[in-house]
Image: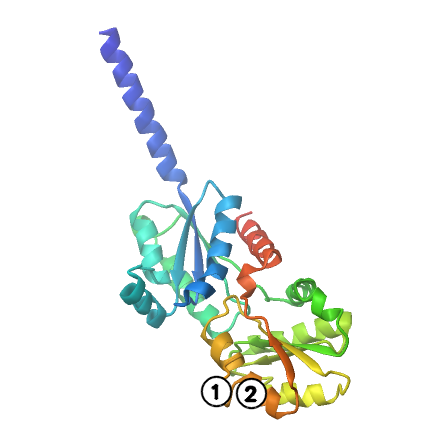
């Protein structure tokens, strides 16, 4: 009888602890545009691993917003990565009560708006198909203060090049056309100019300032003879390797700058996600979101 009672107590304690755990199950869903380039993927993985180290009590999941990239990865690498809708539905189905969505986007542009739409749709759901707590975090540059912090990170990132005479650093952002968030690139440029005027030059692929604007600004600094090209993006993917540094593409920034008279050009094709200061800032934003 005593043995049976001990077994029952043990079973009940396990059941109670499992119920308690289910009630407290929380997850951080990291959402990225994605990349199908294995080398570029390291930048995203670094952010994911940083979150896992800082939040051991949370389930860490990853979602990609690009369906084209997701399908290519599934086809070529046999890896299935959910989109944000599917990832949230899976977390709900697995019993997670609290979910914190953290984007890896640089600015709150069109891509971020789409994630917010998903967040708002799930936020409306109540009962068993909803979450007790659902929050969404901020992109890296969401305010003047954020742009100042990004400027500090970039200055530290390129400190060796900043010490080189006659050297300018060209940064390629993605850009978001006809969207107010695109102005944050100008705010970042202002923050960089305040700290080291005439050393950084920012352009975008999809919006403005364009590469033509970058060239025009460079001409105002005739002392600049050497250039360093690098992506202002979390991953150094297709845009970085082709639109920025593509040697065989006449319209790449590399070749446009060469045709503009700049011969000594080096490239630094490493995504911002691989930068430890970016990873620290990412984790800090998650802390702010949860707390």
Residue designated by label 2: 255
Q: Is residue 224 above or below residue 151?
A: below
Residue placed at 57% from the left, 63% from the top?
A: 140
**Left or right side of 155 for 135:** left
Using the rendered image of the protein, determine whether residue 247 is visible from the camera's viewpoint. yes
Q: Position of residue 201 (x, y in %)?
A: 66, 79
Asked if labels 1 and 2 touch by Cβ distance under 8 angstroms, the answer is: yes
Above or below, 253 against 69 in this view is below
Numbered disc 2: secondary structure: helix
Distance from disc 2 to disc 1, alpha carbons, whole Å, reads 7 Å
Q: Quadrant of the rendered structure where residue 186 is?
A: bottom right
287 left or right, relative to 222? left
What's the mark number on residue 249?
1
Name the residue rendered at 51%, 45% in the picture.
Answer: 53
Residue 67's spot in the image, x, y percent? 33, 70
> Which of 116 and 147 lies nearest the eye of the viewer?
147
Task: Name the residue at the front extreme.
Answer: 264
Q: Quadrant of residue 65?
A: bottom left
């Amino acid at each position: 009888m005593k043995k049976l009672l001990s077994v029952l107590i043990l079973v009940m304690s396990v059941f109670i602890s499992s119920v308690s755990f289910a009630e407290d199950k929380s997850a951080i869903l990291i959402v990225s545009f994605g990349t199908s380039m294995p080398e570029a993927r390291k930048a995203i993985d670094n952010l994911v691993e940083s979150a896992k180290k800082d939040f051991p009590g949370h389930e860490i999941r990853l979602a990609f917003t690009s369906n084209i990239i997701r399908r290519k990865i599934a086809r070529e690498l046999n890896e299935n990565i959910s989109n944000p809708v599917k990832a949230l539905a899976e977390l709900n189905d697995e019993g997670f009560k609290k979910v914190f969505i953290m984007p890896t986007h640089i600015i709150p542009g069109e891509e971020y708006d789409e994630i917010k739409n998903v967040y708002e749709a799930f936020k409306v759901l109540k009962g068993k198909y909803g979450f007790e707590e659902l929050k969404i975090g901020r992109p890296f540059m969401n305010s003047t203060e954020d742009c100042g912090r990004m400027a500090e990170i970039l200055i530290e990132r390129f400190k060796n090049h900043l010490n080189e005479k006659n050297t300018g650093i060209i940064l390629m952002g993605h850009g978001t056309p006809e969207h107010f968030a695109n102005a944050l690139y100008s705010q970042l440029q202002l923050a960089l100019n305040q700290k080291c005027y005439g050393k950084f030059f920012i352009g975008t692929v999809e919006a403005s300032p364009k590469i033509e604007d970058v060239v025009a600004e460079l001409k105002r600094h005739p002392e600049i003879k050497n250039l360093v090209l690098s992506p202002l993006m979390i991953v150094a993917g297709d845009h970085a390797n082709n639109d920025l540094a593509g040697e065989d593409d006449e319209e790449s920034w590399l070749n446009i700058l060469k045709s503009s008279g700049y011969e000594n050009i080096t490239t630094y094709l490493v995504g911002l996600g691989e930068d430890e200061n970016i990873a620290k800032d990412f984790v800090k934003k998650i802390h702010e979101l949860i707390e």
